[in-house]
Image (cartoon, rainbow, N blue to C red):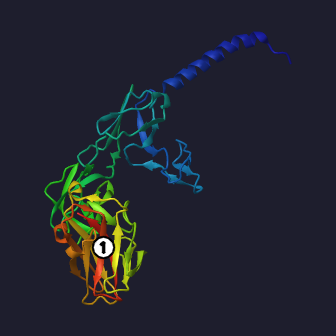
């Protein structure tokens, strides 16, 4: 069969024109009013690094390679600094996208007639007074879609003072404290004083708190402070801090990571005295703490009375000044928290060694935890 070239030459230009016309129409997008059917999360958060979670924009799910299953990626609220895809129709000519009245950048090159890909910036407003509206403006109309911005977790940057007594006021500084509902020291609730702001909360120190992390709870979640409240210079809290621990005692046996009676955390220092004046002793590795420079006024520690401690006591000694020792009673079967002013142990200008010594307690056992200076 011979091909009629005349017919081909006549039809080919028509096909080319129609093809160009069709492509042009597709590039321009639909001319109807825009619609939004849903908003999709574009990636699944995972603790495993370098794992890819593929997504198909016209699918309800994201495939999870790590678990060989999928999860529903449609969301009704968004988190800041997170990427999403807006799914709908007639979106190609989008001129602006805003959340709660604030315009958000989107890449037109990634925009199709059915999807817009963007990342929610950290500056978007959130909270009960916002409109919770996603608004899209195109060349052919405007569409509103109900979509809330979730409050981020609170951020704790610092608190002052670093150590205080029960009933004292502590000021917590940070950000995203909006609508704070609770503050606690480990598991102990604290009273919020006055009116908190988005960057500052004042609380009253609960009774019985010697050392604890500070937790702030808001609608965005609960956050723990990076450092613990209770000491200006920490010596021991489940482990010795840097600089402490060069030697551990005399006339005694010591287990510095004993799990029998921890006051807080998982371990404490178990000391069994083999002599009437045996001691737990710890040095600062040949260095010294400058009392004035660090603003230290007292030593704080907790002691649990074990076997043979009924009616016994321990004394605190700084820098080997046994003539300035300060004694405190032991409570068998429970922890007692002690705060001993440095003026009661010789008023040292520097600190290089700490001793906690049994008084007439041969054969006694104590557990020591949460040691530090305030």
Q: Residue furthest left?
A: 194
Side of 229 where 48 appears, left or right: right
Residue at which label 1 appears: 355
Q: Residues within 10 Å of mark 1 (few under 14, many from 20)?
A: many
Viewer can see residue 119 = yes
Which residue is painted at 19% across and 67% down in the image?
342
Q: Position of residue 335 (x, y in %)?
A: 28, 79
Q: Quadrant location of residue 160?
A: bottom left
Q: Position of residue 291 (x, y in %)?
A: 22, 59
Image: 68 above or below 94 = below
Foreground: 240 or 165? 240
Image quadrant where one finds the C terminus: bottom left
Q: Quadrant location of residue 277?
A: bottom left
Viewer can see residue 207 = no
Side of 342 where 38 appears, left or right: right
Foreground: 210 or 1? 210
Q: Position of residue 230 (x, y in %)?
A: 25, 64
Image: 78 above or below 262 = above
Foreground: 108 or 52? 52
For numbered disc 1, what is the local secondary structure? Answer: strand
Image: 338 above or below 294 = below
Side of 73 where 356 appears, left or right: left
Total labels drawn = 1
Foreground: 180 or 367? 367
Image quadrant where one finds the N terminus: top right
Which residue is painted at 37% across and 80% down in the image?
271
Q: Position of residue 191 (x, y in %)?
A: 18, 64
């Amino acid at each position: 069969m011979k091909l009629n070239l005349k017919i081909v030459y006549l039809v080919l230009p028509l096909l080319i024109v129609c093809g160009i016309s069709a492509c042009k129409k597709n590039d321009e997008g639909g001319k109807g009013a825009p619609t939004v059917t849903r908003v999709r999360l574009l990636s699944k958060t995972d603790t495993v690094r370098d794992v890819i979670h593929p997504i198909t924009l016209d699918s309800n799910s994201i495939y999870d390679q790590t678990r060989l299953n999928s999860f529903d990626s449609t969301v009704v609220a968004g988190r800041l600094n997170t990427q999403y895809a807006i799914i709908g129709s007639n979106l190609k000519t989008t001129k602006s996208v805003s959340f709660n009245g604030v315009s958000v950048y989107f890449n037109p090159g990634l925009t199709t007639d059915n999807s817009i890909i963007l990342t929610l910036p950290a500056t978007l407003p959130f909270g009960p007074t916002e409109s919770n509206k996603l608004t899209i403006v195109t060349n052919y109309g405007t569409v509103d879609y109900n979509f809330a911005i979730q409050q981020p977790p609170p951020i704790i940057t610092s608190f002052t003072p670093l150590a205080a007594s029960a009933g004292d006021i502590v000021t917590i500084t940070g950000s995203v404290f909006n609508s704070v509902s609770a503050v606690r020291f480990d598991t102990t609730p604290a009273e919020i004083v006055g009116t908190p702001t988005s960057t500052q909360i004042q609380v009253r120190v609960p009774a019985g708190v010697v050392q604890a992390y500070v937790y702030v709870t808001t609608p965005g979640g609960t956050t723990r402070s990076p450092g613990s409240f209770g000491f200006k210079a920490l010596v021991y809290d489940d482990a010795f801090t840097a600089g402490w621990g060069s030697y551990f005692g005399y006339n005694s046996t010591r287990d510095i990571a004993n799990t029998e009676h921890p006051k807080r955390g998982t371990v404490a220092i178990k000391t069994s005295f083999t002599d009437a004046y045996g001691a737990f002793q710890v040095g600062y590795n040949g260095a010294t703490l400058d009392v004035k420079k660090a603003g230290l006024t007292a030593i704080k520690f907790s002691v649990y009375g074990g076997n043979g401690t009924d009616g016994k006591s321990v004394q605190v000694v700084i820098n080997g000044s046994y003539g300035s020792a300060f004694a405190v009673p032991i409570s068998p079967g429970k922890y007692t928290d002690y705060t001993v002013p440095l003026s009661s142990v010789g008023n040292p200008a520097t600190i290089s060694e700490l001793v906690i010594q049994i008084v007439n307690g041969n054969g006694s056992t104590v557990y020591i935890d949460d040691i530090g200076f305030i």
